[in-house]
Amino acid sequence: MKKKVVFMVINMNVGGTEKALLNMIAEMPETKFDITVLMLEEYGGFLHEVPSRVNVVFAQEYPKIKDLLNKPTKTMIIKLFKEGKAVKAMKIFLVYFLSKMANNRSIFFKYILKKEPPINDHYDIAVAYAGPMDFISYFVINKIKARKKIQWIHFDITKIGFNKAYAKRLYQKFDNIYVVSKEGKAKCVQVLPELSGKIDVFSNRYSPDLVVRRAEEGPGFVDNFKGIRILTVGRLSKEKGQDLAIPVLAMLKEQGYDVRWYCIGDGNAREEYEQLIKEYGLENDFLLLGAKTNPYPFMKQCNIYVQPSRHEGYCITLSEVKCFHKPIVSTEFTGVYEHITHGETGLVVNFNKEDMYDAIKRFMQDLHIDLIAETVGDRK
């Protein structure tokens, strides 16, 4: 008999967590698993990548409560008063106040989910996959029937807004807590020592064969640039650190290097980064290519790969780009040394522009010599 498994995520946006889920599903034999993906919203560039054998369902009430979850509660209460919904505004204020006083978000979640019916199916395993996200963890524990429940943590909990008291209360209800890197597990145990017996490592999955094969399925770069290409893949956001990359490119250009930096990904920091690019006069050299469901042709064709993140949980893109044996520069974050041996398989630097500039320059000098040799060879 097949095991029934449900993974709960926010959406299927183009990101590392979602990609890791797709990779995991690909490794789960159809003969052994009946898989459901439960999403808060029907959205994301990876939606069409979900295999047809997977059941896709959505939280019914989420569109009605999305603003209450994602916008400041004070803003929503004022909005409701302006709309003439004073009673509803007062209820929300009281529930929110009680949850804050008790330091227990479950009170607030229970109220806003009161009209959300429990999932009727009974699963063998239910996974709060987009973790740590308090709302999804609460939903899996309270709205899904399953023999076994798992919390999955994809981020460095010491670098994000992590409510230790709430997590301690809620996570004890899970059977297992998986963290995607050894260093991440160590930090999780340090923060939640009472739950150490439940915490273990389960690294993000990827298929080297699939990565290499998909690198042949797209054109990659189409700008006919003949210089050195630097690539970064990741959501455009502060934690991914593209704002550090922009001044580093300016330093490289000032030194006369013929180089362009390409960023694959999209996110809420795009406008900020576009403005920063203009301030440095790099409109033609620091290129935001947007989200790509298949970044692998770019990984294969780039000259240097750079991961400038402030923090990560595992960083699956580093695993993927290693398939193409490219020079890699990465900032130091949780899990990075599970990908890179400094000085052997890449360079790991502190999060500052000087160190990153020096590391890239080191590779650039080697590449410059190789490019000269190739040009001389072509002329002969």
Image (cartoon, rainbow, N blue to C red):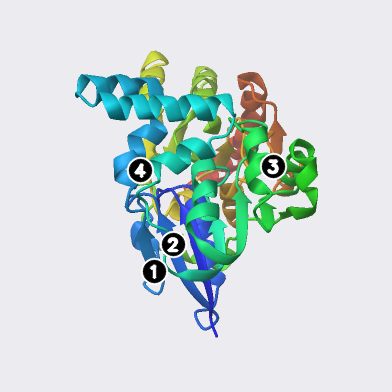
Label 2 vs label 4, nearer the camera: 2
SS at mark 1?
strand
SS at mark 3?
helix
- What residue did someone put label 2 on? 37
Earlier-in-chain disc, 1 versus 3: 1
Q: Give the x, y percent position of residue 110.
A: 46, 43
Label 4 vs label 1, nearer the camera: 1
Residue nearest the viewer, comparing 233 with 126? 126
Q: Give the x, y percent position of residue 96.
A: 46, 28
- Rate crowding at label 3 as few (under 14), some (14 to 19) or many (20 or more) other CA atoms within 10 Å: many
Marks 4 and 3 sit apart, C-alpha to C-alpha, by 32 Å
Is 66 left, or right, of 237 in this rendering?
left
Q: Amino acid at mark 2?
A: Val
Q: Amino acid at mark 1?
A: Asn
- What residue did someone put label 3 on? 336
Marks 3 and 2 sit apart, C-alpha to C-alpha, by 29 Å
Q: Which mark is residue 55?
A: 1
Where residue 255 sits, quadrant-wise, is top right
Is 103 left, or right, of 380 in this rendering?
right
Q: Amino acid at mark 4?
A: Asn
Earlier-in-chain disc, 1 versus 2: 2
